[in-house]
């Protein structure tokens, strides 16, 4: 009888993985690789967290050195760059492929790549666009940006695809972190707008639960405008395809600020953006889009 795809998959030898760091994210990553049949060696500063994974099939290393020796593919998911420094200083990484999924700045990622090279390791930096419950659940839509060694990425792509879909964004090791921070910064801008919207209705007889779906649908409807912004940035023509011009939008800002005042809401989240819109209008055509604000931000 022919083997099913699942049976065939279970016969393929799976790449061994060493994982340093078993916080919320590290533990989720470990469980995803274990579920997919990868031999995994784990280390965590607080050893109880590593021991908890032993009954699920993880091999527990007593030291970073022991963990690093166990596999060519060494994945790090620690709190921050300083903890990566602390954990990896002195480790023998010669011949290893180091994948760093710790959130860092692009400059930290580039410095880490340079450091890995001097240790004789190939380096990939990762920016995780998922929260722990999305790991190992492809339908949840999470993914991880990778940048750095293309060869290491190609070699380990299948293994890296296990916890979450992969998106390689270039050999510049800082690019994964840059994409990560760009998307998360946009998310915080959205959270700021959402906070202001709920604050406006806070003292009224309006159920926040009735505003929520309206708000969510509106944000989804507005999201595709990022494509027009990208096209305008590419062409340099900020008047191309404009739907609501800068002059009209600036004229509307007093209404937003007065409404905030009337509702007893601080304008501190909205005001900085409105100030940039006004500055741009003062030096350009009112017929262009909001895209010019980007040029005011870039120093
Ligand atoms: N959790 C999330 O929602 C986000 C999703 C997007 C990506 N982030 C980043 O992932 C990195 C790890 O995050 P985490 O959720 O696993 O974080 P914690 O649960 O707080 O675990 C932190 C681990 O780091 C270890 N650690 C901290 N300091 C040191 C150190 N000096 N030396 C060695 N290890 C250290 C800590 O060990 P312990 O406290 O258990 O001993 C945990 O293993 C992070 O960059 C997020 O930004 C997650």
Image (cartoon, grey):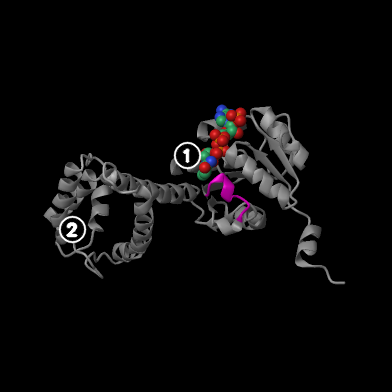
Q: Nearer the viewer, mark 1 or mark 2?
A: 2
Looking at marks 1 and 2 on the same chain, the residue that comes earlier in the sequence is marked by: 1
Q: Where in the figure is residue 264, as x and y percent of width and height?
A: 20, 39
Closest to the observer, 131 or 61 = 131
Closest to the observer, 223 or 242 = 223
Q: Residue at x 19, y 50 (%)?
A: 256
Q: Is residue 41 magenta?
A: no
Task: Tell me the crowding category of disc 1: few under 14, some 14 to 19, or many 20 or more residues within 10 angstroms, Cα based.
Answer: some
Please identify the quadrant where the N terminus is shown. bottom right
Asked which secondary structure carries label 2, the reply is: helix
Q: Where in the figure is residue 48, as x and y percent of width and height?
A: 69, 29
Ligand 1 falls in quadrant: top right
**Which mark is on residue 108?**
1
User: Is residue 215 found left or right of 204 in the rendered image?
Assistant: right
Picture layout, residue 194 above or below residue 21: below
Q: Is mark 2 within 8 Å of ligand 1?
A: no
Q: Residue at x 67, y 54 (%)?
A: 159
| Residue that mark 2 sits on | 249
Asked which secondary structure carries label 1, the reply is: helix
Picture layout, residue 235 above or below residue 284: below
Q: How many marks?
A: 2
Q: Where in the figure is residue 192, as x and y percent of width and height?
A: 33, 45
Q: Which residues are magenta?
A: 130-137
Whether residue 125 is visible: yes
The Cα–Cα distance between marks 1 and 2, rounded to whole angstroms, is 39 Å
Q: Is residue 131 magenta?
A: yes
Q: Where in the figure is residue 110, as x and y percent of width and height?
A: 49, 43
Q: Which secondary structure is most common in the magenta stretch?
A: loop
């Amino acid at each position: 009888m022919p083997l099913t795809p699942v049976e065939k998959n279970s016969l393929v030898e799976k790449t061994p993985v060493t994982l340093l760091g078993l916080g919320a994210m590290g533990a989720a990553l470990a469980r995803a690789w274990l579920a997919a049949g990868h031999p995994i060696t784990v280390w965590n500063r607080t050893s109880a967290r590593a021991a908890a994974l032993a009954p699920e099939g993880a091999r527990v290393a007593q030291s970073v050195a022991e963990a690093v020796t166990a596999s060519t593919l060494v994945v790090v998911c620690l709190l921050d760059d300083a903890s990566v420094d602390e954990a990896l200083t002195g480790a023998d990484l010669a011949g290893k492929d180091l994948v760093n999924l710790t959130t860092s700045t692009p400059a930290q990622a580039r410095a880490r790549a340079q450091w890995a090279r001097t240790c004789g390791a190939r380096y990939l930096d990762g920016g995780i666009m998922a929260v722990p419950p999305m790991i190992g659940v492809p339908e949840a839509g999470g993914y991880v940006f990778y940048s750095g060694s293309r060869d290491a990425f190609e070699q380990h792509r299948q293994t890296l695809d296990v916890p979450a879909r992969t998106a390689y964004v270039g050999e510049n090791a800082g690019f994964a972190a840059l994409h990560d921070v760009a998307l998360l910064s946009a998310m915080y801008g959205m959270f700021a707008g959402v906070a202001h919207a709920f604050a406006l209705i806070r003292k009224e007889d309006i159920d926040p639960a009735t505003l929520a779906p309206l708000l969510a649908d509106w944000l989804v409807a507005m999201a595709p405008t990022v494509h027009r912004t990208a096209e305008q940035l590419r062409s340099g023509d900020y008047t191309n395809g404009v739907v609501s011009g800068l002059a009209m939008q600036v004229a509307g800002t007093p209404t937003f600020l007065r409404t905030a005042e009337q509702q007893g809401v601080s304008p501190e989240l909205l005001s900085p953006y409105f100030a940039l819109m006004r500055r741009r209008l003062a030096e350009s055509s009112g017929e262009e889009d909001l895209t010019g604000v980007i040029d005011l931000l870039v120093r």
